[in-house]
Image: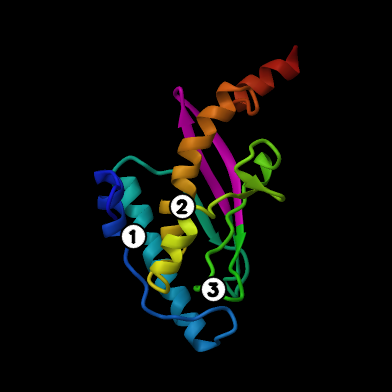
């Protein structure tokens, strides 16, 4: 955590760490891991809401907890930009971090792979590997998606690559 800003350190220390090292193929151990994931996500969401920093909603899209979907948003120049968020839990999880996808932004930035998967390789993957199996989905959102949105969305808005929904509606009416 050396070199991190105080807010990131504070946030990270408040997200519960996970203890069960299990992936989708591990039966009852995976069920236990999912319970830990939910507890961690609930704690992170509650912390964000109490700090007036609510910026995502996700839930498992299937009973196995291997597919997750939701929304994330970023406020830039007092305008809220909202995006679909989705990801699959890799078979090798938790050794491998999930690849977070924002399909609406596919092809709009170089810091993204095909299918709208955000680029987390250089900064986040080594951190995930070092903290396996203690990190979970909440940590991926906090240390992966949040900084990516903060770095990329202002650039995409300022360059005209993405438009606010109100701007898009106004130009469609013209």
> Callout 1: 10 Å neighbours few (<14), some, many (20+)?
some
Who comes first in sequence, dot 3 or dot 1?
1
Question: Label 3: few (<14), some or many (≥20) within 10 Å?
Answer: many
Q: Residue at x 71, y 50 (%)?
A: 115
Q: Is residue 12 magenta?
A: no
Coloration mode: rainbow
Q: CA separation, marks 2 and 3?
A: 19 Å
**Residue 50 appears at what percent x and percent y?**
29, 46
Q: Residue furthest top?
A: 174
SS under mark 3: loop
User: Quadrant of residue 81 in the image?
Assistant: top right
- Mark 3 vs mark 1, CA separation in Å: 21 Å
- Residue designated by label 2: 123
Magenta residues (range)? 70-86
Which quadrant would the N terminus be assigned to in this image? bottom left
Q: Which residue is mark 1?
A: 43
Q: Residue at x 51, y 53 (%)?
A: 122
Q: Residue at x 52, y 45 (%)?
A: 72
Residue depicted at x 49% and y 81%? 22
Mark sitting earlier along the chain (2/1): 1
- Judged from the image, the secondary structure of the residue bearing numbered disc 2 is loop
Give the mark nearer the N terminus: 2 vs 3.
Answer: 3
Image quarter where the C terminus lies is top right
Residue 9 in the image: state x and y as whole percent.
27, 51
The residue indicated by pointer 3 is 93
């Amino acid at each position: 955590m050396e070199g991190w800003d105080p807010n990131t350190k504070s946030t990270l220390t408040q997200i519960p760490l996970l203890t069960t090292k299990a992936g989708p193929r591990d039966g009852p151990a995976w069920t236990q891991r999912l319970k830990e994931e939910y507890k961690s996500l609930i704690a992170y969401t509650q912390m964000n809401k109490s700090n007036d920093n609510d910026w995502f909603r996700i839930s498992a899209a299937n009973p196995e907890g291997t597919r997750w979907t939701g929304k994330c948003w970023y406020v830039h120049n007092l305008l809220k930009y909202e995006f679909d968020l989705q990801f699959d839990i890799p078979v090798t999880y938790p050794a491998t971090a999930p690849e977070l996808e924002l399909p609406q932004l596919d092809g709009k930035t170089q810091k993204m792979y095909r299918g709208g998967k955000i680029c987390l390789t250089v900064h986040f993957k080594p951190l995930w590997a070092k903290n396996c199996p203690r990190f979970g989905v909440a940590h991926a959102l906090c240390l992966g998606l949040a900084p990516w949105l903060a770095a990329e969305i202002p650039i995409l808005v300022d360059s005209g690559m993405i438009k606010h929904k109100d701007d898009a509606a106004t130009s469609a009416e013209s």
